[in-house]
Amino acid sequence: MINATDSNGAADVPLIELCGVTKVYGTGAATMEALRGIDLRIYPGEFVAVMGPSGSGKSTCMNILGCLDTPTAGAYHFQGVEVGQLTRNQRALLRRHYLGFVFQGYNLLNRTSALENVELPLIYRGEVARTRHPRARQAMIAVGLGGWERHTPGELSGGQQQRVAIARAIVTQPIVLLADEPTGNLDSARSVEIMDLLTAFNRDQGITIVMVTHEPGMAAYAKRAVHFRDGLIDNDHSHKDNV
Amino acid sequence: MLGNALLLALRELRRNVMRSFLTMLGIIIGVAAVIILVTLGGGATKQVTEQISSLGSNLMMVSPGKRMGPGHASGAAPFKLADAEAIARDVPSLKAVAPTASSPMTAIFANENWSSTVTGTTEQYFTVSNRRIKEGRAFTQAEVRTGVANCVIGETVRTKLFGSQSPIGNKIRLNKVSCEVIGLLEAKGQSTMGTDQDDIILVPLRTFQRRIAGNEDVGLIQVSVKDGVSTDRVKLEIGRLMRIRRHLSANEDDNFNVMDLKEIIMMLSGTTRVLTGLLGAVAAVSLLVGGIGIMNIMLVSVTERTREIGTRLAIGALEREVLLQFLVEAVVLSSFGGVIGILLALGSSVALAGVLQVPFVFNAPIVLVGFLFSSAIGVVFGYFPARKAARLDPIEALRHE
C-alpha cells in the first residue's frame, strides 16, 4: 500500500512488542479464543491501521495494547516493560502517563464544558489549575477549536466532539495514541478532517498512532496496515516489521 | 488527591443540580427535624425548670402516700394540722410551714358563678408559695385559728365574678358558706403544668376543714427552707419526724413522701427530655431514609455513568480515585444537605419558639451532631455505590450503552 519511507527517524527498539500473545475468554466448553498467538512490533513514530472483520480479534488486541486487558499467554512489552506482570493500578498509571485514547463514540462527559473535558486527564495527573487551564486551551487550539472551550458536547457537532476527544487524548502529550474507529460515526468530510488532524499529530509531534478502522480509505492515511482474521494477523503491509 | 476528588465531585453535582437538590432533600428534612425537635424540647425543659424555680428554690412538699417512683404515690392516711405544727416546731432551719387542703368548688357572687379550687391554709402559705397581695390583705394567724369566713382570691376568680370591679368587701358563696373577700393575689400566670395559678380561692384552714370539707384532713404540707440550708438534711429530718408521728416500724416503708424542688424539676424535665428524645428518634429515622435515598441515587448514577467511568479508567483514573470521587459526591450531597438542614432548623426554631412561647435555646452539640451525622450518612451510604463504580471493568464499562 504505502511505500517504505523511514521518515520519522524511528529507533530500532520497538515501542510495543507482542510475542505469542493469546487471549482466551470463558472456561470449559464455553472458551473462546480471541487471539491465537500474535506477534507484533510497533516502533516509535509509526501510524498503524488495524483492520479486520468483527470477531477477528482486533478489538481484543487493542484492549491489550491499551493496557486495559492482559494476555492469557505470551508477553506484551511496552517500552520494555512486561505489562502482563503489572497490577491494575500500575496499568492505570501507565495509561495515564503514556497513552491517549480516542473512541468511536467520543465518550465526552455530557453537560460538561469542552475545556473541562480536555482537562480531565490533567486532573488525574495532579496538575494544578494554573498550568492545567493553559495546557487544555492549547490542546483545544491544536485541534482547531479555539474559542469553543465553554461549549458542552451537546452544543457541538459530531466532528467537533471527536476533536475535543482528540484534544483530551493529546493534552498529556502521550507516546501512543490508540484510536478505536475514530471516524466511525462521522460523514466522509468530517472523517477527512479527523484523519488530517491525526496525521498532523503523528508527523509533527511524533506521536505513535494505532488506529482501528473498517474503511480502507481511512487506513490509507496510516503508513502501515495490520489485518486481523480469526485471531491471527493475516496480513501486515508494513515497512519495518522485518527488522 | 482529595482535592482532585472534590473538584471532580463538585463538577459532577453541578451537572445535575435538580437531582442533587432532590437527593439532599431527605437529609435536609431529617437534620432539620432532629434539630428543631431537640432545640424546642430543650427550650421547653428550660421553661419548666425556670417556672418551678420561680416557685421559690427552697420549697419542699410533704404529701401522704407511699412513694412509687417519681410522681407516683399510693393512697395513705392524710395528715392533720398537728403534723404541720410538729414540723414547724421540731425541724430547725425552716422559714415557713403551710398545711393545705383543697377541693374543687363553685364560687357564686350575685348572678355570676365560677368553678375554681378552694384551698384551706394558714397565713404562712403566702411566704411558702411566694405570693403577694395586690389589693386588700391576707388573713391573719388569729383568723386562721378562729376560722373566720373570709378569703383571698386570685385574678382569674376576680375577673369571672367581679369583672373589673374591686372584690374587696364583697361576699362570695362557697358551698353554703358565705365568705368575705379580704384580699386579691398578684397575678402569676400559667404554671408549668398548664394550670392557671390565678384560678384560686384561699380560705383559713380551720374554716375550710370545719365549714367546707367537714373533716380535719390536711392534704399537703408545703415547707420553705431557710436560704443556704441543705434541703437534703431537712428532708431527712422531716422524714424521721413523720415516721415517728405515723408510728412506722423499722421494716415498714414510708407512707408519705417528701419531695424537694430539685426532684420536681428532675421529674418534669425528665418527662420533657424523654419526649424530646422520642421525637428526636423518630426524626432520626427520616435521616436514615434520607441516607437510603442518597444510596439509591448514587447507584442509579453509577449505572447511568458506566461509560463515563470506563472513560475515566481508560484515561488513567485509579480505582481508589474513582471510589473517592463517588464517595465525595455522596458526602458533599449529604453534608451540604446537613448544612441547609441546620440553617433551616435554626430559622424555624426561632420562629416556632416565638409561636409556642418557648424560649429559644441554641443547642450547639445537636447542631454539630446533626452535621457530623449527615456527613457520616454520606460515607456509609455512598461507599457501596462508590465501590461498585471503582470495581467496574474498564472494557465492559466502555462497551456499556
Image (spheres, coloured by chain):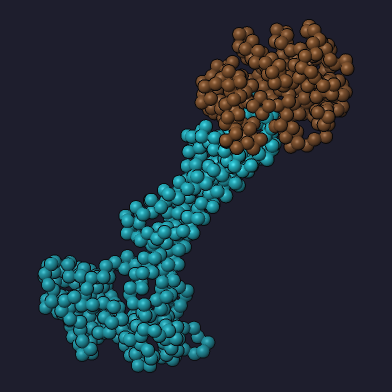
Chain colours: A brown, B cyan
- Identify which residue is drawn at 64% across, 31% down: A121
Give coordinates of residue A196: x percent, y percent. 65, 13
Above-or-below relation of B173 to B390? below
A66 sits to left or right of B131: right
Q: Where does the image place residue A37, in percent across and percent down from the top left?
A: 87, 21
- Residue B289: percent from the left, percent from the top? 53, 45
User: Which residue shows up at 54% across the image and 28% down it?
Assistant: A112
Quadrant of res A54 = top right
Image quarter (top left, top right, bottom left or bottom right) of the N terminus of chain B: top right
Q: Residue at x 71, y 10 (%)?
A: A221
B6, above or below B350, in the image: above
Res A183 → quadrant:
top right
Residue A19 position within the rendered picture, expressed as x and y whole percent measured from the top left: 87, 24
In the image: residue B299, left or right of residue B109 = right
In the depicted structure, whether residue B134 falls above or below residue B319: below
Image quarter hosting the C terminus of chain B:
top right
Q: Is residue B76 visible?
A: no
Q: Nearer the viewer, residue B245 or B335?
A: B335
From this viewpoint, is residue B201 visible? yes
